[in-house]
Amino acid sequence: MGSIINIGWIGALLLLAAWMPETITTMKSESLEALNPKFIFFSFLGSVSLALHSYRIGDMAFLFMNTTLSIVVAIELAVYFYKSN
């Protein structure tokens, strides 16, 4: 069971590492061209839903990943709305 937990944490960190550069690029960009608000919104809802599910089943690696990803996507959503006004 220990190796499964390690693989879960490694996967969570890799997914977050993949998402972070996109968020940083979004924040630095002057253009909204690369942002799709529907994608961002559904990503946020999906991450929050999966975080709640992870909490319910007690999967801490998945909970960490989805909670953190929800925060990252919320930042992208805020940047989109800030830049669109």
Image (cartoon, helix red, strand yellow):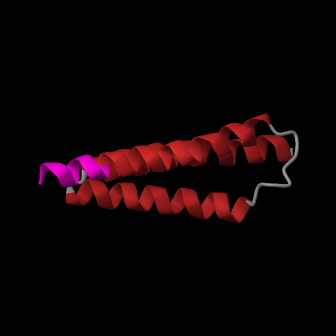
Closer-to-camera residue (80/2): 2
Give how far across and how far down residue 52 sits, in percent.
34, 57
Question: With 79 as the anchor, is 55 left or right in this view?
Answer: left
* Residue in the image at 77% along x and 55% along y: 35
Taking the view exactly as shown, the residue that stands out farthest to the left is 1
Give how far across and how far down residue 65 sits, in percent.
40, 48
Q: Main secondary structure of the magenta part?
A: helix
Residue 2 in magenta stretch: yes
Give how far across and how far down residue 36 sits, in percent.
75, 60
Question: With 15 as the anchor, is 28 left or right in this view?
Answer: right
Q: The magenta stretch spans which residues?
A: 1-8
Q: Is residue 20 above or below residue 35?
A: above
* Residue in the image at 78% along x and 34% along y: 28
Give how far across and how far down residue 82 sits, in percent.
78, 40
Dividing the image into 4 quarters, which one contains the C terminus? top right
Closer-to-camera residue (82/63): 63
* Residue in the image at 66% along x and 45% along y: 22
Question: With 28 as the anchor, is 39 left or right in this view?
Answer: left
Dividing the image into 4 quarters, which one contains the N terminus? bottom left
